[in-house]
Amino acid sequence: MEYVDLINQIVAAEQSACRLAQEAQEQKASLEAGLVQESAKLREDYMARAKRRVEIVAETEAARAREETAALDARLAQSLDALEQAYQAHQAEWVDALFAQVVGRAP
């Protein structure tokens, strides 16, 4: 084998190696870009799911707060009715007792 053939084989091997290295770099860059896109998509999907979960929790809590408020309003209405009934039943007694306390004599 002559030196020229040997040198040509070495040059061809080096060119082939450079081409393979370049292809590997391009594949690496392509994969990295794909990973960045995939990561961004996963992040968007996660944020969308998290936002929906927060909305569901907010809706649930708002409904629960409305129910509790309605229950408290019902209790307040019952208490006011009971107080009104007690006032109607004992109005004269309470007026006499208050008058007696104000003027300082026993009822």
Image: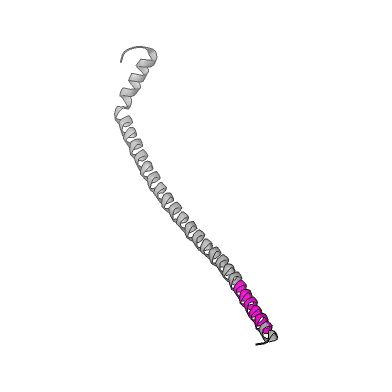
Tell me: residue 103, above or below residue 10: above
Q: Residue lying at the far left in this picture: please name it.
A: 89
Q: Which residue is painted at 37% across and 18% down in the image?
A: 99
Q: Quadrant of the image for the N terminus?
A: bottom right
Q: Is residue 93 above or below residue 24?
A: above
Report the span colored magenta.
7-26
Residue 47 rendering spot, x and y as whole percentages: 51, 59
Looking at the image, which residue is at 30% across and 27% down? 90
Tell which of 93 and 68 is nearer to you. 68
Relative side of 3 to 107, left or right: right
Q: Where is residue 84 in the image (x, y as percent from the top left)?
A: 34, 34
**Can you name the residue that lies furthest to the right here?**
4
Q: Which of the 4 quarters of the picture holds residue 19?
A: bottom right
User: Which colour assignment does the render follow?
Assistant: one colour
Quadrant where the C terminus lies?
top left
Vertical side of 40 occupied by 92: above or below: above
Q: Which of 55 and 46 is in front in this view?
A: 46
Front residue (pair 2, 54): 2
| 73 left or right of 12 in image | left
Q: Is residue 107 left or right of residue 3?
A: left
* 46 over 61 or under it: above or below: below
Q: Does the magenta stretch include residue 9?
A: yes
Residue 43 magenta = no
Give the tally of numbered discs: 0
Report x, y in % for residue 39. Answer: 54, 64
Front position in the image: 70 or 97: 70
Q: Main secondary structure of the magenta part?
A: helix
